[in-house]
Amino acid sequence: MSNLNFALGKRVLEECNTPEAMLDGKITKTNGTTGYCGVHVPAYLTIDLGQNYPIGYIRFLLMNRRGEDTNHGSAKREYFYRLLACEDTPHINNSTKWHVIYDTLGQGYVDWQCFTLSEPMQIRYLRIHAIENRKN
């Protein structure tokens, strides 16, 4: 399988401040106010890949690398989330079968999040369920 970035240029289904920043592939030129896709937690960010793809590796960067957050004081910001995926179109009544790829289970994370699946999974929708962060 080639190393393709399936999310680049795809659509984020929920409201967020700058959905294009979530899927533009840029990891520099970010600060506390621009260059990232932000939501108020708890929230979902769902990416529609347009069709099913066999995906065996997923990675994404949390907003503030290494936990640094100069806009909100010296305390370290950590993120708590679930990473989910499905093949089918999400239904309004939430009857869609979402597969949990990862759950932080009470441990906060920062920086790059990388997941290698034991077998490639057919994925059309990839969802990050932002549960909370330690700062706000």
Image (spheres, rainbow, N blue to C red):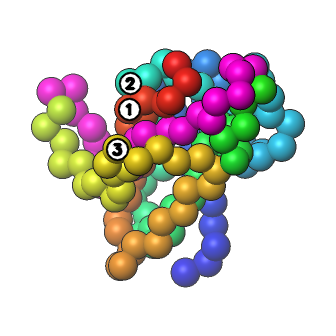
On the question of residue 82 being in view, the answer is no
- Amino acid type, residue under disc 1 in the picture: Ile
Q: Residues within 10 Å of mark 1 (few under 14, many from 20)?
A: some
Horizontal side of 100 relative to 127 (left or right) equals left
Point out residue 44 in the picture as x, y percentages from the top left corner: 40, 31
Depth check: 26 or 48 in front? Answer: 26
The residue under label 2 is 42
Task: Determine the residue positioned at 35% across, 69% down.
Answer: 121
Point out residue 64 in the picture as x, y percentages from the top left corner: 69, 38
**Which numbered disc covers residue 121?**
none
Q: What range is drawn magenta here?
A: 71-93
Mark 3: secondary structure: loop
- Amino acid type, residue under disc 3 in the picture: Gly
| Real-space Cα separation, disc 3 to disc 2, in angstroms | 14 Å
Mark 2: secondary structure: loop
The residue under label 1 is 131
Task: Determine the residue positioned at 80% across, 34% down.
Answer: 30
- Amino acid type, residue under disc 2 in the picture: Pro
Residues marked 3 and 1 touching at CB (< 8 Å):
no
Prevalent SS, magenta region:
loop
Residues marked 2 and 1 touching at CB (< 8 Å):
yes
